[in-house]
């Protein structure tokens, strides 16, 4: 492996080097700290190479923290006090907490780049190449913000994936939890503008596809690659769905001032979630929002798409089925209305103000059938359930 320092020497870069801290352990001497601070103070730009040593992360065991070694955080803090131009280059296998992120000029995330990572770092730092990557994971502000925080590591025999489908950005966006860097985030030495979002059709049905196109323009002074990201939001009140989900992306190379049209495709599968009652992927008929942006928290363009399907989720009445569900179903509503009529009369609702009436209506709509046991014998409730299921089968 070639380090960035070795490459800088080979190319005759005007740089000096100070060790700063141990690359293997969370250790730093006072002399190392003083030398690094002095070098940073005398430089035009201070570049700190930080990351996780093997004692902090490996493929053979789980991390219990998202922190960098304390000595590294201290070094960056101290250098930022004496040098206004600080660049931090990160070498890490996954997301880390960055408490100093707002006090440095730039962060170059190189992860574990392999044998040529030193040459890559040199080219990126000196502008010979444009860093154009985007994060494939969210960087939370702290470990406690992670959706799996309350469930990991579990016990010796069981780990509960309690976050369910709300993994990564699906959790942070839906819960509106602030993050350090969002999924899909990525800066470069240029800027991009988005415009002219077009759908090939305003509506979609099973078996069809819709093309989504938009114009992307490099508004900066150097060539660069942009990662255009396509997200979809279910606007139909479907329970337990994320606020948005990535459904496509494309990387486009643009010269300064150049504009290209980027096209992506959506199908019914892209609107769907896995419905266990159907044992298949399912998207309800309704309206979906198509969103295009450069990160999950940086949406630039939106449009609406209508979708219709002949698929239906089977409606089976049980003791936990609510009266509201039965009242909104055309097949069962007449029977339930007939059942509730005498109950409403005996309740004596005349004279109640509008607020109390609305409260009672909400209570009725959310009442499960088993709650009727206070006014109906249990065997009659069972017969009612059988009757409802027969109506649904017709």
Image (cartoon, rainbow, N blue to C red):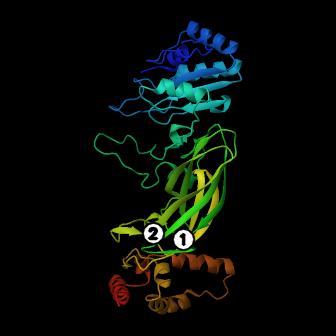
Dot 1 alpha-carbon crowd within 10 angstroms: few under 14, some 14 to 19, many 20 or more:
few
Rendered-image quadrant of the N terminus = top left
Looking at the image, the residue that sits furthest to the left is 157
Judging by the rendered image, the residue that carries numbered circle 2 is 268
Q: Is residue 3 above or below residue 132?
A: above
Which residue is rendered at x = 57% and y = 11% of the image? 18
What label does residue 236 carry, if any?
1
Tell me: 105 left or right of 328.
right
Q: Is residue 341 above or below residue 154?
A: below
Between disc 1 and disc 2, the foreground one is 2
Rendered-image quadrant of the C terminus = bottom left
Dot 2 alpha-carbon crowd within 10 angstroms: few under 14, some 14 to 19, many 20 or more:
many
Residue 243 visible (yes or no) = no
Residue 365 or residue 32, whichever sits in front: 32
Location of residue 248 in the rendering, given as x and y in whole percent from the top left corner: 49, 56
- Distance from disc 1 to disc 2, alpha carbons, whole Å, reads 15 Å
Counting residues from the start of the chain, the first of labels 1 and 2 encountered is 1
């Amino acid at each position: 492996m070639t380090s960035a320092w070795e490459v800088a020497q080979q190319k005759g870069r005007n740089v000096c080097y100070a060790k700063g801290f141990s690359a293997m352990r969370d250790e730093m001497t006072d002399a190392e700290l003083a030398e690094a601070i002095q070098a940073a103070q005398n430089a035009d730009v201070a570049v700190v190479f930080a990351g996780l040593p093997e004692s902090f992360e490996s493929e053979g065991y789980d991390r219990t923290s998202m922190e960098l070694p304390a000595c590294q955080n201290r070094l960056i803090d101290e250098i930022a006090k004496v040098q206004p131009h600080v660049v931090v280059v990160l070498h890490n296998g996954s997301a880390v907490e960055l408490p100093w992120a707002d006090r440095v000029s730039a962060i170059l995330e190189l992860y574990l780049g392999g044998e040529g990572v030193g040459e890559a770092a040199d080219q990126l730092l000196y502008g010979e190449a444009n860093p154009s990557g985007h994060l494939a994971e969210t960087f939370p502000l702290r470990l406690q913000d992670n959706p799996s925080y309350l469930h990991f590591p579990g016990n010796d025999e069981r780990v509960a994936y309690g976050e369910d489908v709300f993994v990564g950005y699906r959790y942070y966006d839906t819960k509106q939890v602030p993050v350090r860097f969002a999924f899909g985030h990525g800066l470069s030495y240029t800027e991009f503008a988005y415009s002219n979002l077009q759908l090939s059709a305003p509506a979609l049905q099973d078996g069809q596809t819709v093309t989504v196109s938009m114009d992307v323009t490099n508004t900066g002074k150097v060539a660069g690659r942009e990662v255009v990201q396509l997200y979809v939001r279910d606007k139909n009140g479907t329970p337990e769905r994320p606020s948005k989900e990535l459904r496509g992306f494309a990387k486009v190379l643009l010269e300064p001032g150049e504009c290209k049209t980027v096209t992506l495709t959506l199908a019914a599968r892209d609107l769907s979630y896995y419905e266990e009652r159907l044992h298949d992927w399912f998207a309800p008929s309704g309206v979906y929002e198509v969103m295009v942006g450069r990160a999950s928290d940086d949406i630039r363009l939106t449009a609406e798409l209508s979708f219709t399907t002949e698929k239906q989720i089977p409606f089976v009445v049980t003791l936990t089925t609510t009266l509201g569900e039965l009242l909104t179903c055309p097949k069962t509503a007449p029977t339930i209305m007939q059942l509730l009529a005498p109950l409403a009369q005996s309740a004596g609702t005349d004279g109640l103000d509008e607020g109390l009436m609305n409260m009672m209506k909400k209570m009725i709509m959310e009442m499960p059938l088993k709650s009727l046991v206070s006014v109906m014998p249990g065997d009659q409730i069972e017969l009612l359930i059988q009757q409802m299921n027969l109506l649904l089968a017709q």
